[in-house]
Structure formats: structure tokens, C-alpha cells
Amino acid sequence: MENPSESKTTTMNSQTDKLVRRTTMVATATAAYFLLTADYGSEPNALDPVKRAIQSAESSVKDFIFGAKRQPEKEIENPLLLTLPNPKPKPNPNPPSSSSSSSSPIQAVISILQIIPDWADSIKERGFRQNRTLYDHEKWVHHRSSYRHLRHFLTSLSSRVILSLIPPVIAFTLVAVVIASYNSAVSLNWLPGFFPVLRSSTLPYQLTAPALALLLVFRTEASYSRFEEGRKAWTKVIAGANDFARQIISAVENSGDAQLKKALLQYIVAFPVALKFCHVVYGSDIRQDLQNLLELDDLLVVLNSKHRPSCIIEFISQSLRLLNLEDSRRIMLQSKISCFHEGIGVCEQLIGTPIPLSYTRLTSRFLVSGISLSLSYFGMTATGLWFLLLLLVLLLCSALKNVCQQFFFNTTEVGVLIEEPFPMLALDELE
């Protein structure tokens, strides 16, 4: 029978040999790492510290295992780090930039300047989410009223079109005020005599204003064409759904298809809702609108599908194939689905494809250039001769320039607003 003390001694010896080999390998690998990564120059005895470190590591481990007294546990430093010379410090490839310290004030200024544009954009987007209603006789009478001009003028400050133009108008007005202030300071001899008075001619503005007006008219006309196309497409979808439902009610007379007929009518009614919230209007809960129109199983399938209107069309096609109808009548009913496919195509085209961006960018750049010419004229001609009239001149300059800006900016803003037609339509009333 094997002695327990002998087996314990054999186990300790094997563990000791493994520990010695592993310690030697670690020390050698560490030394090789420092040799590869550090720069020790061209000294002839540069490897002596490495050799001494390896020998010290081996002897310390053997003394510890073969009877040396165990020292109290403490943090043991790596002998290689104590014996190897300090390598030359490597320069940081990405030193801290001095601009990072100054980026916070710049970001603070930018965030302050973005307050007014963000506020104007929030008002504009909130107006898109308003529910539109169809006109009746009373609304048409109110619309034709002789007081409409006064009413529209008094409600200018509540118009989202005008409020959305506050950021660009303020920016251009400030430039005009700065130019007018400079000219007034020069004319009042507040600046040295070598500062010239800035003057401008109205000829560039007169030459470019007609071209800018025509460009804005064409841009607005293109936007209105999209608005009209979207209105016709949605009206066609609703009319097609109503006609399809009427055909189903009159064609399906078999009592055995009553449940299938009910489901088919639910699919037809649910299609405009799915099309509206998937490809026309955003930010609404489609589950809440469809849960009263579809069964729970069908609702889950529609919500999990990638293209919800097409999923409902597939439900309609399968239901038509299951009905007990004559082939001619079934073909006639299936032909009614084509208006749904056409409506999907038109809606996706209008939402996914705006007016060519080059056209929109050209209009914006031309508009900014034209307004710059106008501000250069009004700002450079606003020179005050008396200190008391300086503020009046500046305000007059700003008022004249604001009028010119409003004419052009309002035109282009209306074109941008109606470019996406469906938020401007009374979709709920048309269903």
C-alpha cells in the first residue's frame, strides 16, 4: 500500500518543477518584451541586467520552495523593472490639443444661437401634426369675407409661416444694422478719417430680383403640383376602397361566406389606415387605430410585417380566393385591388422623392444672394447725420429690409411646406 507521505512529496515535487519552469518562462518573456519595446542605446553590456534578473527570479523561487522561510505576504515588485534601465520615453502621437479647452465656450455660443431656430422649427412641426378639417358652407363664407385681409394681417404673429422665418430674418437684419452702424459712425467722425463709407448701387439688386422672383414662382408651382397629386391619389384610394366594399357586399350572398365577408370588409377598411400611418403620416400609434378594425391574430401579423399595406392586400387576395364566387366575378373583384397598388406607388413616390435637391439648393442660394444685395443697399445708404437720429435710421433700415425679406422668404417657405402634401390634407375627414 502506498505511503500517503510519499505520494504527497511526489505531488509537491512535480508542482515545484512546473512552478520553476513557468517562472523562468515568464521572466524570459518579460525580458524579451523589454528588449523589443525599449531603446537602450548602443551600450555593450545592455543585456547584463536582463541576465541578472532571470537568475534572481530562478534563485528566489527555488529558495522559496526548498526550505526558505516564507516572508509575510506583501506586494512584490517585478525584478525586471528594478534592474532594467529606464527606456527613453516615447512621444505621445496624439498630444492634447489646445482647441479642446476652447471648444466648450464655442459650443456654448453655438447652443445659444440655436435656441431661436429650434424654437421656430418646433412651431413648424407642431403645425404639421394639427388635424385638418374639410370646408363646409360656413367656412367658405368666412373664407370669402371682406374682413379677411384685416384678419390675416392681425394674425400674422401667430402664423407658423412667418414665425419660421424669424431666424433668417434676424440674421440678415443684424448684418444690415452692423453696416448701418458703421456708416453712421464714419459720418459722425467717431472713427478715424481713413475708414471709408460703404456704399452700394441698386443695379445688382434690380437685375437679379426678376430672376429670383421667377425662380421662386416655379419652385412654388412645383410644390403645389405635388400637393395636388397627393390629394388626388388619396381621394382615389378612398373612393376605390368604398367601391370595393360596395362590390363585396353586393357580390357575396352565400350565408356560408358571412364570416369571410366580414373579414374581407375589415381588411378593405383597414387598408387606408395602414397606408396613412406607414407611408403618409408619422408619429401616430397604428396599433390603436387598427385594433378596432382587425382581429387580434391579423393585427399581430400586420404589425410584424415589413410593408403593412401590402400585407393587408395579401389578406384581401387570399380572402377573395376562398370565396364561393364565379370566376368572372372573382376576377372583377380582384381588379379592384389595382387602385390600392397605385395608391401605394404614388404615396411612396411623393414621400420618398422630393423636388430635385439641386433645384431647392439653387433657390436657397439665389435667395440668400438676393437678400445680401438688398441688405448691402439698405444698410450702406442708412447713414445718420445726428446722434439722436441714429437709432431711428437703424430701425428704419431694418424695417425696410424686413419687408423685402418677407416677400421672398414667405414665398419659398410656402413652397417648402406644401412640398410634403399629406400633412396639409384632411386625411381623417376624407376616409
Image (cartoon, rainbow, N blue to C red):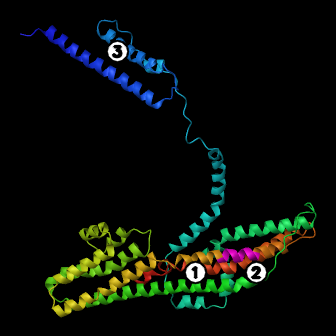
Relative placement, left or right, of 247 versus 236 is left
Q: Magenta span: helix, strand or loop, mainly? A: helix
Q: Which mark is residue 58?
A: 3
* Residue 245 pos. (x, y %): 29, 87
Q: Which residues are magenta?
A: 366-374
Quarter of the image with the N terminus is top left
Q: Earlier along the polypeptide chain: callout 2 or callout 3?
A: 3
Instruction: Name the side, left or right, on which 204 lies relative to 78.
Output: right
Name the residue beneath numbered marker 2.
Answer: 204
Up-down relation of residue 156 to residue 386 (above or below): below
Indicate the amino acid at tag 3.
Answer: Glu
* Label annotation for residue 415: 1
Q: Residue at x 38, y 18 (%)?
A: 54
Q: Tell me if I can see residue 155 in this picture.
A: no
Q: CA distance from mark 1 to mark 3?
A: 84 Å
Mark 2 crowd level (few <14, some 14–19, many ≥20, 10 Å Cα):
few
Tag 2's secondary structure? Answer: helix
User: Picture quarter containing residue 388?
Assistant: bottom right
